[in-house]
């Protein structure tokens, strides 16, 4: 394959994706087609004739989709995100289609969004914004809470969790952390404390999720873990929606046994997120219920969306494709 003859089908794209990738592609000159629909069993045949498919968080790369892609002649799956919970990696291996991703683009973008969500929630910024827009300067019901002196529980101390822990430490919060692979040198350097998972749930005034979605972490926030938490604790989720059993969260919010939640991800987000549903009916009752709570903030998988991150995602994704082509040329004895 020559670089300029490589064709890439991009799925689930929006204007900001198209702009960032078109700009970066000036260095690579690939033939790119941008689709606005998801990649799934119904749409996978649209990959026919493309060398590479570029997918995002809510595209489906099940075994069935992967075998359709193979039949279409696709040679590489390039994810333009960090998480790969939506890909059947075993099926991709069996089909002989490598999967590449963007392990880090800007962990700061996500950690800073988590901080924005936390402050918006604890200081009731959405309510204040709505009021002042209509000339209502009353403060009733807007009493917040100092973060200084509270305990933050960080679940997952990878790239994003570490940055968020350090941001919250700047507010004067006590930082407790949990990870299956603790980085004790980092924790000691910052005077942060690794604790057991049950301790994290019990101690946290702010619990923030930064681990990947796996079989072990699915619904890590559930009826039992919620029962351990303080009644006024808040949960921040910029990880993946299915880390939380959302029905259990709604139940705790209704019983007022949890203080609130700020969610950038939702376990059934793929139908709604990234699209405008403002003039349509939301049929997902759990999402609709979540949207009614005054102590819940939802953003639509926005945490990654900074210009820095978009540029880095485009650079790394197109660089991954280039590396693949070069290794393919070497394997085929062209170089
Ligand atoms: P990372 O790989 O650097 O860190 C993940 C950490 O989680 C690792 O330290 C790992 O040991 C830990 N971990 C794995 N299994 C665990 C478990 N069972 N319990 C506790 N910890 C566990 O990843 P990252 O770059 O920090 O990203 C974290 C997650 O954030 C990603 O997996 C992705 O799902 C999500 N993310 C969301 C957005 C967004 O826009 N909302 C953007 C990027 C990433």
Image: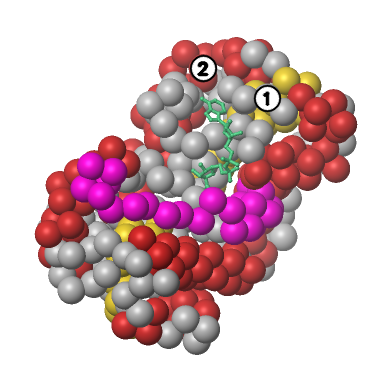
Residue in the image at 32% along x and 75% along y: 1
- Estimate the x, y position of residue 205 in percent, counting from the top left: 69, 27
Mark seen at residue 195: none
Q: Which residue is mark 1?
A: 182
Up-down relation of residue 36 to residue 24 (above or below): above
Residue depth check, mark 2 versus mark 1: number of the one nearer the observer: 1
Q: Nearer the viewer, residue 101 or 132?
A: 101
Dot 1 falls on a residue whose secondary structure is loop
Residue 104 in view: yes
Tell me which corner region of the image, top left, top right, bottom left or bottom right, holds residue 94: top left
Q: Which residue is mark 2?
A: 225
Up-down relation of residue 213 to residue 102 (above or below): above
Q: Earlier in the sequence, mark 2 or mark 1?
A: 1
- Estimate the x, y position of residue 105 in percent, counting from the top left: 59, 58
Q: Nearer the viewer, residue 303 or 325?
A: 325
- Residue 103 among magenta residues: yes
Mark 1 Cα shell of 10 Å, populated few (<14), some (14-19), many (≥20): some
Identify the magenta region: 92-114
- Residue 249 among magenta residues: no
Give the number of marks.
Answer: 2
Left or right: residue 269 versus residue 224 is left
Residue in the image at 14% along x and 56% along y: 68
Dot 2 falls on a residue whose secondary structure is helix
Residue in the image at 43% along x and 68% along y: 326
Tell me which corner region of the image, top left, top right, bottom left or bottom right, holds residue 153: top right
- Estimate the x, y position of residue 53 in percent, counting from the top left: 30, 65
């Amino acid at each position: 394959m020559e670089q300029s003859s490589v064709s890439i089908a991009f799925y689930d794209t929006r204007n900001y994706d198209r702009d960032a990738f078109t700009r970066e592609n000036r260095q690579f000159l690939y033939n790119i087609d941008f689709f606005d629909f998801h990649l799934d069993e119904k749409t996978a045949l649209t990959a026919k004739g493309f060398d590479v498919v570029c997918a995002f968080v809510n595209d489906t790369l099940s075994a069935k989709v992967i075998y359709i892609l193979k039949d279409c002649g696709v040679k590489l799956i390039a994810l333009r995100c960090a998480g790969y919970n939506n890909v059947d990696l075993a099926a991709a291996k069996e089909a002989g289609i490598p999967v590449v991703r963007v392990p880090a683009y800007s962990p700061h973008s996500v950690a800073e969004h988590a901080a924005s969500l936390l402050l918006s929630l604890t200081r009731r910024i959405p309510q204040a914004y709505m009021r002042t827009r209509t000339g209502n300067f009353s403060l009733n019901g807007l009493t917040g809470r100092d973060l200084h002196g509270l305990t933050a529980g960080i679940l997952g101390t990878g790239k994003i969790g570490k940055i968020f822990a350090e941001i919250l430490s700047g507010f004067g919060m006590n930082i407790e952390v949990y990870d299956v692979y603790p980085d004790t040198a980092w924790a000691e350097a910052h005077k942060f404390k690794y604790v057991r998972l049950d301790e994290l749930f019990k101690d946290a005034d702010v619990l923030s999720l930064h681990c990947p979605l796996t079989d072990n972490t699915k619904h890590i926030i559930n009826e039992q873990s919620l029962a351990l938490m303080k009644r006024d604790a808040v949960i921040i989720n910029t990880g993946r929606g299915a880390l939380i059993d959302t029905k259990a969260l709604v139940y705790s919010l209704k019983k007022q046994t949890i203080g609130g939640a700020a969610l950038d991800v939702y376990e059934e987000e793929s139908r709604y997120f990234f699209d405008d549903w403002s003039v349509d009916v939301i049929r997902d009752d759990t999402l609709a219920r979540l949207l009614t709570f005054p102590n819940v903030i939802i953003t639509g998988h926005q945490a990654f969306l900074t210009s820095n991150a978009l540029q880095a995602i485009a650079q790394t994704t197109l660089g991954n494709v280039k590396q693949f082509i070069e290794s393919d040329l070497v394997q085929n004895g062209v170089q």
